[in-house]
């Protein structure tokens, strides 16, 4: 009985297709539009391996889209981008790392992880449970009000 080995196994085709798709995704990941997310996940594989639970708040934090005055001002629903704390414009970085309005939640996070400042990569990888609790504790709607 003659064996024919000219066929490519399905597993090889799947693996090559997955690698090609990953490379295309990684190329798209390096565009300026993905800059905020790339600070947390420099490589697509980092995001795929992440155990972080995605909620609307966490998605806004990781993408930098929505829930800040800077973002809303960019599309004109807000006349100003200044944070109600008066320190600087209300960007996601400001809310997470500097804003006096979120200092209580940030102090709780610092106590739980024991180091500050932590890199964004560490926050989503090493401290994902603590970081998720921190993000979920922030009242973004209240922060967007000017009279806070």
Image (cartoon, grey):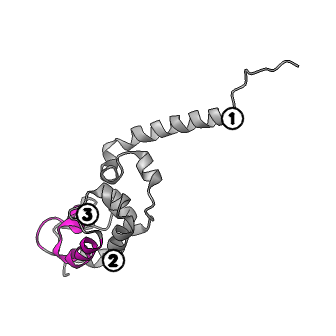
First to last magenta residue range: 86-112
In the displayed structure, does residue 36 sit left or right of residue 89?
right
Marks counted in the figure total: 3
Q: Quadrant of the C terminus?
A: bottom left
Q: Which residue is mark 1?
A: 10
Closer to the N terminus: mark 2 or mark 3?
3
Q: Distance between the Cα atoms at labels 3 and 1?
A: 45 Å
**Residue 50, placed above or below residue 31:** below
- Asked which secondary structure carries label 1, the reply is helix
Q: Which residue is mark 2?
A: 137
Residue sitting at 35 percent across and 70 percent down?
A: 130
Quadrant in the picture for residue 141: bottom left
Q: Examine the structure image and report whether residue 74 is included in the region drawn in magenta.
A: no
Residue sitting at 36 percent across and 51 percent down?
A: 41
Q: Which residue is mark 3?
A: 92
Q: Mark 1, residues whose alpha carbon is within 10 Å: few (<14), some, or many (≥20)?
A: few
């Amino acid at each position: 009985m003659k064996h024919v080995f000219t066929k490519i196994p399905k597993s090889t085709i799947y693996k090559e297709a997955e690698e090609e798709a990953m490379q295309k995704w990684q190329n798209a990941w390096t565009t300026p539009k993905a800059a905020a997310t790339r600070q947390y996940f420099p490589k697509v594989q980092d995001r795929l391996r992440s155990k972080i639970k995605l909620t609307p708040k966490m998605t806004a934090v990781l993408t930098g889209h929505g829930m800040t005055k800077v973002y809303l001002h960019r599309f004109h629903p807000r006349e100003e981008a200044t944070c109600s704390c008066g320190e600087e414009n209300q960007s996601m970085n400001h809310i997470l790392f500097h804003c006096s309005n979120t200092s209580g939640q940030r102090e709780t996070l610092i106590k739980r992880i024991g180091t500050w400042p932590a890199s964004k990569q560490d926050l989503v990888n090493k401290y994902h449970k603590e970081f998720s609790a921190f993000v979920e504790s922030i009242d973004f709607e209240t922060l967007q009000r000017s009279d806070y």
